[in-house]
Image (spheres, rainbow, N blue to C red):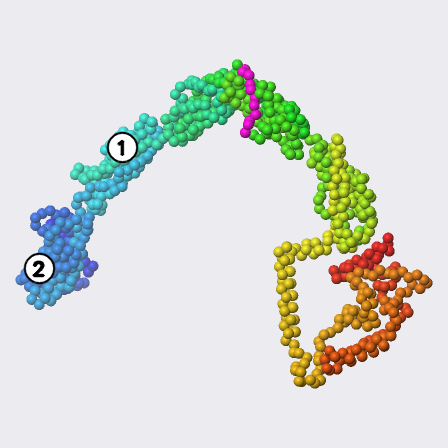
């Protein structure tokens, strides 16, 4: 039953089996009971309560443009007797604004035009109340009002317009691009959103699939060089393309991309080029270009010279930006030798598409004829570099050599020579401007400068502006004009323990001159001076000589420095000689001359101390000594006097802390001072010099001590006299003092038992172990070593 607003009413079956009706049917149309036949044939009537709501969901058309509100549906309750005692109320989405209800009749209407694309449905709640008591006659129920779609939206291309590319010469049906349109209408209801594609512009080159929107090529062999850009318009229409459907369109700009389908071609087959013979090697002399209608790498061309005549003299390279062939010169041109050259040049694509090999080899050739132009050239020297020689000390004007240059042109003009004035070698040489002969301007010294470099320039007499240059190297040959000399200026160290015949140093000689077969030197001592008693010289006949000691036992305290003149002869022609004086320094050395260095120098060298460090050490020592002296002075100043006062005179015990020198103090209690002080002064011996042994005549070889040799003096009388002088001395302190004198009596007849005063005898003792005892026993080792050397000698 159609009740209103094109809403269809269909019967529905509830879950309980009870039929429910759509709005518009009253409760009177609903049966109130069911009948069931029993087994005995009787009929049983079942009664059930009636439902309060008889309604379902509602529908409303979108875009309603009528003057009156659009009727949606009707609500009705079984409690409504039609007397107006029931009041219907509505709430939910749009209640009161979009949807209104008649409180008495329950009619629902839409007051506004709805758009399904903005909202597809509304959820509302309905309730029936007693108008007088406001009590709910029915519970609140929920229902839905759906907005029914109409075709009010045209298809659209959201991503348009489009840009696409396709290679030229593509086959028919090659896919280019797929376009997709959208429709806002409901695709599940009718044909409002069913779209069909068609092409409005772009035929016959392209086509479109009506269902998928895929654009394809429709024409074969489309050539980019003929036409590159195409504009295609595609239409999308809903309602499956039927009349009355809405449509939308978009534009696709299609560009044909390039492929290598065109070979390079030279605009003409023959070219001519003029090149002067003065063109520089490696520099460009011309250009040639082949045309290619393709683009990018498809138009890259490689140029080459395919004939040997042209390839030997010229080269060609490719300018990738300009796609030109740059022709350069490989060898110098000479108009007098060859006036023309023919070049066969080939231009070929570097990227060839094998699909189009049927079109040809994708290369082209052209002929280039080069004409060589005659140019007035500078003179040409016979060789590129001259090497000459001259002996040193040659007089000024000596000829060194000659250079030769000629005019390469057919006129063969005369040539003039001169030297480059900017070079330093000009002051040593000059050149004849006509003949090119080079001569010296002064004697040359090989030892000062063995090589000279000059530059000779040549120019034509008719055209002086054209110059050519050639380097000339002059070697100064050696002559024997420098005497030899000893190779070293250092001092020669001579050990004090050197023996006769011992080699002190091997010397060599040097000579500033150059000997091609090696230097030969001879050595000797000067003949005009007396024979040297200390040293001699031995020529080893191998350009070396040995300095040999002639005596033994050098002493640096007696004489530290010796000078030895040596005469050296070279093996040149004529032979020259020179005299060099060597300085020999005597130094104490270890045994067997293991260290040939003075002790002081060895100490400094081993310590590795600089001058500043030594000065700092000496300053520290001086400061320490000053502190010690100051401390002793202060300590002595604090001692109390022996006598406190003149009134307090009594016996006092005075303690002196002074101690004797012990066994080393040999002068503190010398008995000689007791016997005869005057004689004692005369008989004092130097303890730093070993006393020489005295040789006594007579059968007896024993010696007496010095004390025995003094005049016989009565020691007892001497002591007694000293005691009386001490008692009578008024200057001594007034207290007792004890003076002790010790006397051992006369000397023994056997003499001293000291080995130092005994006559020297050969000892069987080996004292080599003293060398290992350290520097404290070095002096003792030298003494015994000298004794052994004396005995051996």
Q: Position of residue 415 (x, y in %)?
A: 55, 18
What residue do we see at 11% from left, 56% from top?
100
Q: In this rendering, is residue 448 above or below 362?
A: below
What residue do we see at 7% from left, 66% from top?
132
Disc 2 target residue? 103
Q: Residue 577 lies in what quarter of the image?
A: top right
Q: Disc 2 versus disc 1: distance between alpha carbons?
A: 63 Å
For residue 306, say whether it is visible. Answer: no
Mark 2, Cα crowd under 10 Å, few <14 / some 14-19 / many 20+, is: some
Question: Looking at this view, is 714 or 269 the one in front?
Answer: 714
In the image, is 421 to the left or to the right of 49? right
Question: Looking at this view, is 726 or 443 the one in front?
Answer: 726
For residue 652, say whether it is visible. Answer: yes
Q: Residue furthest right?
A: 699
Q: Residue 389 lies in what quarter of the image?
A: top right
What residue do we see at 14% from left, 59% from top?
91
Residues at badges 2 and 1 in contact (C-beta under 8 Å)? no
Question: Looking at this view, is 66 or 303 the one in front?
Answer: 303
What residue do we see at 78% from left, 44% from top?
546
Mark sitting on residue 66: none
In the image, is 532 to the left or to the right of 490? right
Helix, strand or loop for disc 2? loop
**416 part of magenta stretch:** yes
Q: Position of residue 57 (x, y in %)?
A: 16, 55
In the image, is 689 to the left or to the right of 35? right
Q: Position of residue 143 (x, y in %)?
A: 17, 57
Helix, strand or loop for disc 1? strand
Disc 1 target residue? 231
- The part of the chain drawn in magenta is 412-422
Mark 2 or 1, nearer chain start: 2
């Amino acid at each position: 039953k159609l009740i209103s607003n094109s809403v269809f009413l269909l019967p529905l079956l509830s879950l309980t089996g009870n039929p429910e009706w759509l709005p518009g049917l009253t409760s009177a149309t609903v049966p109130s009971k069911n009948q069931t036949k029993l087994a005995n044939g009787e009929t049983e009537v079942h009664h059930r309560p009636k439902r309060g709501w008889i309604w379902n969901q509602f529908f409303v058309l979108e875009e309603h443009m009528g003057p009156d509100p659009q009727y949606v549906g009707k609500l009705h309750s079984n409690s409504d007797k039609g007397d107006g005692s029931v009041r219907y109320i509505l709430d939910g989405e749009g209640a009161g604004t979009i949807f209104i209800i008649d409180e008495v009749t329950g009619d629902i209407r839409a007051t506004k035009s709805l758009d399904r694309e903005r909202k597809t449905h509304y959820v509302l709640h309905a309730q029936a109340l007693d108008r007088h008591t406001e009590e709910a006659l029915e519970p609140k129920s929920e229902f839905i009002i759906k907005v029914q779609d109409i075709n009010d939206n045209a298809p659209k291309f959201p991503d348009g317009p489009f840009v696409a590319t396709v290679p030229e010469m593509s086959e028919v049906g090659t896919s280019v691009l797929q376009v997709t349109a959208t429709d806002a209408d409901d695709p599940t209801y009718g044909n409002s959103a069913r779209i069909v594609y068609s092409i409005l512009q772009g035929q016959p080159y392209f086509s479109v699939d009506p269902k998928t929107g895929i654009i394809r090529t429709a024409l074969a062999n489309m050539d980019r060089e003929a036409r590159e850009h195409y504009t295609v318009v595609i239409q999308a229409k809903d309602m499956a393309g039927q009349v009355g459907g809405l449509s939308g369109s978009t534009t696709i700009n299609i560009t044909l991309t390039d492929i290598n389908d065109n070979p390079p071609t030279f605009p003409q087959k023959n070219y001519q080029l003029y090149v002067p013979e003065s063109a520089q090697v490696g520099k460009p002399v011309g250009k040639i270009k082949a045309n290619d209608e393709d683009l990018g790498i498809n138009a890259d061309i490689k140029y080459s010279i395919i004939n040997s005549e042209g390839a030997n003299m010229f080269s060609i390279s490719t300018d990738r930006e300009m796609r030109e062939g740059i022709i350069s010169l490989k060898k110098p041109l000479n108009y007098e030798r060859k006036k023309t050259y023919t070049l066969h040049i080939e231009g070929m694509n570097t990227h060839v598409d094998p699909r189009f090999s049927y079109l040809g080899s994708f290369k082209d050739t052209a002929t280039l004829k080069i004409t060589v132009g005659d140019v007035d050239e500078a003179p040409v020297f016979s060789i590129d570099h001259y090497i000459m020689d001259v002996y040193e000390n040659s007089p000024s004007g000596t000829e060194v050599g000659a250079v030769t240059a000629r005019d390469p042109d057919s006129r063969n003009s005369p040539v003039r020579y001169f030297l480059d004035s900017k070079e330093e070698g000009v002051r040593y040489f000059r050149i004849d401007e006509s003949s090119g002969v080079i001569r010296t301007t002064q004697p040359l010294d090989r030892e000062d400068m063995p090589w000279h470099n000059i530059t000779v320039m040549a120019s034509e007499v008719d055209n002086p502006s054209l110059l050519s240059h050639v380097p000339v190297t002059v070697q100064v040959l050696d002559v024997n004009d420098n005497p030899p000399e000893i190779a070293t200026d250092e001092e020669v160290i001579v050990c004090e323990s050197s023996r006769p015949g011992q080699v002190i140093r091997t010397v060599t000689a040097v000579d500033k001159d150059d000997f091609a077969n090696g230097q030969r030197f001879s050595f000797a001592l000067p003949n005009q001076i007396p024979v040297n008693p200390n040293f001699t010289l031995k020529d080893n006949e191998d350009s070396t000589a040995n300095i040999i000691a002639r005596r033994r036992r050098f002493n640096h305290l007696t004489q530290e420095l010796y000078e030895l003149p040596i005469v050296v002869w070279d093996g040149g022609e004529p032979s020259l000689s020179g005299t060099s004086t060597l300085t020999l320094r005597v130094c104490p050395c270890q045994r067997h001359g293991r260290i040939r260095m003075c002790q002081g120098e060895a100490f400094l060298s081993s310590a590795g101390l600089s001058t500043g460090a030594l000065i700092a050490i000496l300053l520290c020592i001086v400061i320490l000594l000053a502190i010690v002296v100051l401390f002793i002075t202060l300590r002595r100043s604090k001692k109390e006097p022996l006598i406190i006062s003149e009134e307090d005179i009594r016996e006092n015990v005075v303690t002196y802390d002074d101690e004797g020198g012990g066994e080393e103090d040999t002068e503190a209690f010398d008995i000689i001072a007791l016997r005869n002080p005057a004689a004692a002064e005369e008989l004092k011996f130097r303890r730093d010099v070993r006393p020489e042994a005295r040789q006594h005549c007579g059968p007896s070889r024993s010696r007496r001590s010095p004390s025995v040799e003094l005049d016989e003096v009565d020691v007892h009388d001497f002591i007694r006299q000293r005691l009386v002088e001490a008692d009578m001395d008024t200057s001594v302190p007034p207290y007792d003092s004890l003076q002790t004198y010790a006397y051992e009596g006369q000397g023994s007849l056997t003499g001293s038992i000291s080995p130092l005063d005994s006559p020297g005898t050969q000892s069987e003792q080996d004292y080599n172990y003293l060398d290992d005892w350290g520097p404290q026993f070095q002096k003792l080792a030298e003494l015994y070593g000298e004794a052994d050397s004396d005995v051996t000698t």
